[in-house]
Image: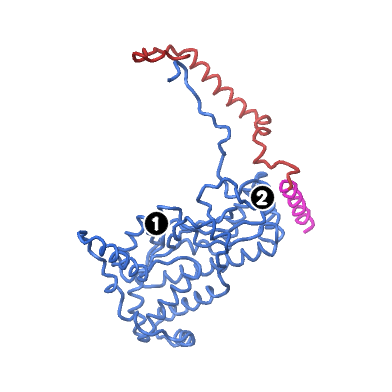
Amino acid sequence: MAKMTELREAVLEELGAIAQGRCESAQDQMVGRFLKWEDWQRASQAVQRGLSAEERNRQPAFLSPPPGWLPPLS
Amino acid sequence: MPPGGGFVLPRLDGIPKGYPALANEATAAAVARTLIQTGIAEPERWAQAKGSATEFVRATLDDWLDRHGRAVVERNFYLDVALTDHADPQSWHDGEGWAGPQRLYISVEVESAGYVVFGPTLRLLEKVHFRLPATFYQRFVGSVERWVRVYDHRDGLERVEQIKEWLAGEPEAEYELPDVENAIPACMKRRLLSDRSLPRMARQARSSRRKRLLRGLLTLVEKANQTERPVADEDVSEQLQDNNPPVPALLAVFERSDAIEGCFDEEAQTMLEAPPEPNVILPLNGRDATSVASAFEKLACMTQTLAAASALIELMPGNERTEGARK
């Protein structure tokens, strides 16, 4: 019974802090979780490496612009 | 001018990760506290919510519905209940006029309409008393309508009148009017029995099926009359001024595929042209325990009424099925 009361008070305290903006809820801590979660960081690096490799390996063939049009800027 | 090479990833910053019914975690946390203080929410749930007050409120509402007859209601009604910060949760809001946790709503919206056939039941009850069929129908629909919209022959007749008016202005148009008048059984036009007669008839009914039907009806009437449904105040009316009427939660016909069902099928094509009003809106102050408890008491009355109606539909001949029908 005492444990239940303790838990209830602890949860009320935590929710009170979120309600008053004294602490961020897990929902608001996306960046914080990213910094702590290694799998997430590794997955992001893998995506980034994949995108870079794709950029390096691509040999795009540019189409000529229609007459009177300016060529692409990049 | 298109870029020459490479490809562009869309920018996702600024795009919400989800669309919760409550604007932010602070609001959800304020309501969550009150829900615990009133005994509606269980603190043990907080660990499962993984630190998200929004998730905690959603799970609490889910648990509460499970404890208040959701399984029975869902057999014949298809509703979506949410705790929101706008009376019209389906429309886009830019935050203007948002009052914070002091002004929240429990909204009940319809995913699709349930379906009930009355004809065989009315014929069965006519054998008990010639005025009983109309009384049964009136008490059934009246009780359900205290909480959610029912589409029945009255809507069908209204639609016929609208079509007639339209045809009057379009003399060239060809249109076959649905014969709603003829779809209404003659027994429906008889005078209703008094409220005192029903319990007596339930006691005296000879067949167990009729007895169960009348007892089911008495339970439904009792549950529906436990409390008054709140009338929309000025604030709610203003928020819903551009909405369509609520989507019916129940279609009541006398026979399968009758003219009333035909009218409903036609009207259903345009019911969602503008966002419909929720069927039920219960305003509450998320910081006030009395206000929250009162809104949940009203919601309990609604779920008990719909659970009684759902159980009664399954007793009514012509509605036997393993899963509820829907339109």
Q: Main secondary structure of the magenta part?
A: helix
Three-letter amino acid code at the position of disc 1: Met
> Which chain is mark 2 on?
B
Q: Is residue B322 left or right of residue B82?
A: left
Question: Looking at the image, what colour scheme do you see?
Answer: by chain
* Quadrant the N terminus of chain A occupies: bottom right
B236, above or below B155, in the image: above
Left or right of B310, for residue A31: right
The residue closer to the viewer here, B211 or B152, is B152
Residue at 60% across / 25% down in the picture? A42
Q: Where does residue B181 sit, x and y in percent of width and height?
A: 29, 73
Q: Say how many tags the image has.
A: 2
- Label 2: state its secondary structure: helix
Q: CA distance from mark 1 to mark 2?
A: 32 Å
Q: Position of residue B276 (x, y in %)?
A: 46, 56
Q: Amino acid at mark 2?
A: Thr
Q: Does A11 lie within the magenta span?
A: yes
Q: Chain of mark 1?
A: B
Disc 1 element: loop
Of the two numbered discs 1 and 2 in the rendering, the one whose residue sits closer to the viewer: 1
Q: What color was chain B assigned in the picture?
A: blue
Q: Give, as a single range, the part of the protein colored magenta.
A: A1-19
Q: Which numbered tag is attached to residue B271?
A: 1
Q: Kindly identify the residue that appears in the image at 65 percent across and 28 percent down.
A: A38
- Quadrant hosting residue B247: bottom left
Callout 2 crowding tier (Cα within 10 Å): few <14, some 14–19, many ≥20: many
Answer above or below: position of B196 versus B44.
Answer: below
**Image quadrant where residue B38 sits:** bottom right
Residue nearest the observer in this picture, B303 or B286: B286
Which residue was labeled with disc 2? B27
Q: Is residue B96 rendered magenta in the image?
A: no
Q: Colour of chain A?
A: red
